[in-house]
Image (cartoon, helix red, strand yellow):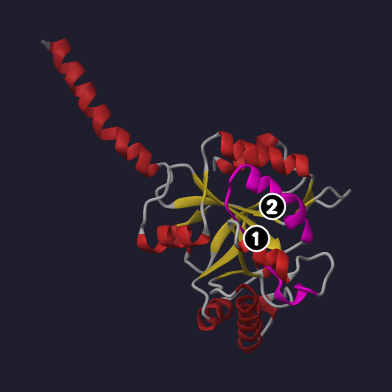
Amino acid sequence: MKVFKRILIFILITLIIKPCECKAMRDDKITVLMYHSVGYEKNNGLRMSEEQFRKQMKYIKDNGYTALTLDELYSYFIENKPIPKKSLVITFDDGYLDNYKYAYPILKEFNLKATIFVIADNIDKDNRSMNSGQLKELQSNGIDIQSHTLKHEELNKLSYELQLKTLKESKQVMENILDKKVNYIAYPYGKYNEDTIRAAKDAGYIMGFVTGGRVAKKDDGIYTVHRIGVVAGDGMDVFMGRLHQ
């Protein structure tokens, strides 16, 4: 009889704990990865090789991770909409041409969603950056395009008025090109202050991204979503560690 009671108690505890474990594993946090450039360049830590990027994306896919859109992330943070247990977000900063040439085919190969924060003033002007046609193609194929300001200014060094100007103008430029609402902003260098958050709200953005080197948490604030930088010097063990923070 005692043995039967112990077994019954064990079963009940297991039934109670299992759902809680699933919920608590990432209940209030999520990994947001930040890349810049794909295409090897010696002594440039921001530019990783295609091979390295492909290995990382393959690991994400093979291990059952779901790459969210920023709309899905926003709904998770603000509306508590459920997301898959192993969710993450893939982002790129600046809008380099190699994102289109090298990163995009790999993301497409593994059917992974991503977001690219683009410096608006570089569009159709800088041969290292993507042009309007390439941005439209990406936007139509699961790669979301959002704002990284007009000229990549260090926002915390600008007045509120100048911050508002670059945030508004970059938003307008990109909305005109993409024919859609641009709702999200990544602050250059991750730099921001109280005026930045106010300017982002006043410019019409609904979520903003910083750096920080750690997972994003709901209580960080919707205009200071943390991201983890991924660089060329990271081995697979380091990369896996970033996913498991």
Is residue 101 visible to us here?
Answer: yes
Considering every residue shown, the one lying at the far right of the view is 42
The residue located at (19%, 23%) in the rendering is 9
Q: Tell me if residue 91 comes above or below residue 160 in the rendering.
A: above
Does label 2 or label 1 sit earlier along the sequence?
2
The residue located at (46%, 58%) in the rendering is 72
Q: CA distance from mark 2 to mark 1?
A: 8 Å
Which amino acid does the dot numbered 1 rest on? Answer: Leu
Circle 1: is it few (<14), some (14-19), or many (20+) Cα within 10 Å? some
Q: Is residue 217 magenta?
A: no
Image position, residue 235 (x, y; %): 72, 37
Magenta-tinted stretch = 97-124
On-image quarter of the N terminus: top left
Considering every residue shown, the one lying at the far bottom of the view is 161
On-image quarter of the C terminus: top right
Q: Tell me if residue 86 comes above or below residue 169 in the rendering.
A: above
Whether pointer 2 and pointer 1 mark residues with C-beta atoms closer than 8 Å, the reply is yes
Position of 158 with respect to 199 (left or right) is right
The residue located at (60%, 77%) in the rendering is 175
Which residue is identified by label 2? 104
Label 2 element class: helix
Circle 2: is it few (<14), some (14-19), or many (20+) Cα within 10 Å? some
Q: Tell me if residue 67 comes above or below residue 120 in the rendering.
A: above
The residue located at (17%, 11%) in the rendering is 3
Image position, residue 119 (x, y; %): 71, 71
In the rendering, which numbered label is found on residue 93? none
Is residue 189 visible to us here?
Answer: no
Task: Give residue 54's quadrant in the image.
Answer: top right
Which amino acid does the dot numbered 2 rest on? Answer: Tyr
Which residue is identified by label 1? 138
In the image shown, does 84 or 159 lie closer to the viewer?
Answer: 84
